[in-house]
Amino acid sequence: MKSTLLALFLAAGSVWAQQPQQPAPKPLSLPDVPPDTVVAVVNGEKMTAGQLKAILEAMDPKLQQNFQREPRAFMQQYAMLDYIARNAVKAKLDEQEPTKSRLKSARMQILWQAAVEHTGNSAHVSLEEQQKHYEANKDKYTLAHIKAIYLPFSATASSGSGKDKPMTEAEARVKAEKLVKEARSGVDFVKLVKENSKDAASAAKDGDFGAIRKGDSLPPEVKNAIFSLKKGEVSDPVRMQNGFYIFRVEQIGTEPFEKVKNDVYQEVRGQIVREWFETQQKTARIDFENTAFFPPETPRPAPPSLAHPAHK
């Protein structure tokens, strides 16, 4: 059974299988200086442009931005921290607890992250492997361009009148079902969007929600509703936590390999990292010598079977 720690390690490795959810930070921009050029002397020790670049690249993007805004002030702070750290080592604080254990823990985390990155970076994924993965998972590359109407509801009574009065869930459901019937009978969907949808961002674009891939992380009710439709079809109302959605599929089809091959490449690399980690977990050994400190775990009851009696 996978532990929380295992999930943490696998999440770290998933960088090779997932597209970034947020825009990547601006790349570090440094002067074009030869790497072996000495650019500073920190507490008596020469620092080259290459060394400084490596130090900065290992830092959090926010710290990199601080350097780029005020490089001299940043390096003054760096020199102060370096000076304090050097004196701490002279005082042998690194050999005393809890600092000794903290350093060991930090070193372990840095090294396992380096190992994950090395495994991903060194993984060789042939074009043949990518194409094989694509064919085996072709369904997940189904792409739907959709428009939507959003009807929010409130769980509590609210003030207001007319169009501004929040609907109850029952009222929103009735209205959603009415709009579905109108859309399926031929009423212009964009007209229904502009007159009824409460999602301002999509309503301003005629209800356009962009493209959604079947392999994307979506609530199952949304995914099932959208990908059960053909081009031009309108879904039944889909209930979410605070409202109902009505979807219409504008275009739907499977993306060709050439368009998604980079995603496929990253997914295969991610699988390599996960398999590598699972091998490390199986190989690592620990023997518990003290049952008072490590009492045996009580076996957990098996979850109830969901299989139909006839299938057992």
Image (cartoon, grey):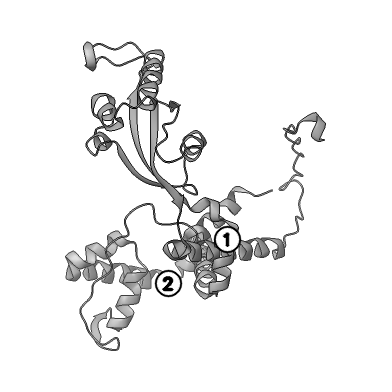
Amino acid type, mark 1: Glu
Image height of 17 relative to 240, above or below: below
The residue identified by callout 2 is 89
Q: Residue at x 34, y 73 (%)?
A: 55
Image height of 199 relative to 284, above or below: above
Q: Residue at x 39, y 33 (%)?
A: 247
Amino acid type, mark 2: Val
**Foreground pick, 168 / 36:** 168
Image height of 153 relative to 84, above or below: above
Which quarter shows the C terminus?
Answer: top right
The residue identified by callout 1 is 135
Say whether residue 48 is visible.
no
**Foreground pick, 95 / 53:** 53
* Residue 26 relative to residue 96: left or right: left
* Residue 38 relative to residue 5: left or right: left
SS at mark 1? helix
- The crowd level at tag 1 (other Cα within 10 Å; few <14, some 14-19, many 20+) is few
Say whether residue 65 is visible.
yes
